[in-house]
Image (tube, rainbow, N blue to C red):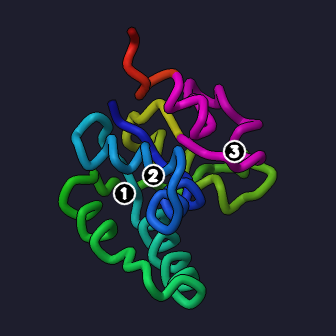
Amino acid sequence: MKIILDTDVFMSGIFFRGLPYDILDAWRHNRVHLVVSPDILNEYCRVATQLMDDFPEVDPEPFIELLMIKGSLVKSPHLPEQVCTDGDDDVFLACALASGTKIIVSGDKALLKVSGYQGIVVISPRGFVDKYLKRKS
């Protein structure tokens, strides 16, 4: 299953534990496939650099390198008009449309509010883990 991770989810999975880490672990074990655009990848790198100042013991580089190997990099044109109240979040929707990805995992309220846009589901990390990653008994 192809998914796109909002920057906060990707960074939380690297720098902290919890559900975002569980999602990255599922990716490392080929249970999900991550899709990014150049804009998203640049944002990941920018935010990782900022977080390294506060958390110098964490090295995000292996995750970025793994993303370049195991992820899909997709060129995505900008949306013709702003969809999210925070226009910076539109890069995730644009990537989903360009790649045919139907799921964006995000805790961002602006993105969660536009869930359903052109068939794209925006779901919280908790919702994603509960619905797609937990094994059924």
Q: Position of residue 13 (x, y in %)?
A: 48, 57
Residue at 53% across, 49% down: 18
- Dividing the picture into quarters, in which one does residue 135 lie? top left
Q: Amino acid under label 3?
A: Leu
User: Which badge, 3 or 1, is on the more N-terminal residue?
Assistant: 1
Residue type, mark 2 in image: Tyr
Q: Amino acid at mark 1?
A: Lys
**Considering depth in this image, is 87 or 1 the residue closer to the camera?**
1
Q: Quadrant of the N terminus?
A: top left
Answer left or right for 131 relative to 118: left
How would you rate the neighbour count of disc 2 (Cα within 10 Å): few for under 14, some for 14-19, many for 20 or more?
A: some
SS for callout 2 = helix
Instruction: Please determine whether, in this image, residue 63 is positioned above or below residue 110.
Output: below
What residue sits 55% from the left and 76% below the top? 47
* In this view, the mark in front (1 or 2): 2
Viewer-closest of 123 and 58: 58
Q: Nearer the viewer, mark 2 or mark 3?
A: 2
Q: In the image, which residues are magenta?
A: 105-130
Residue 75, disc: 1
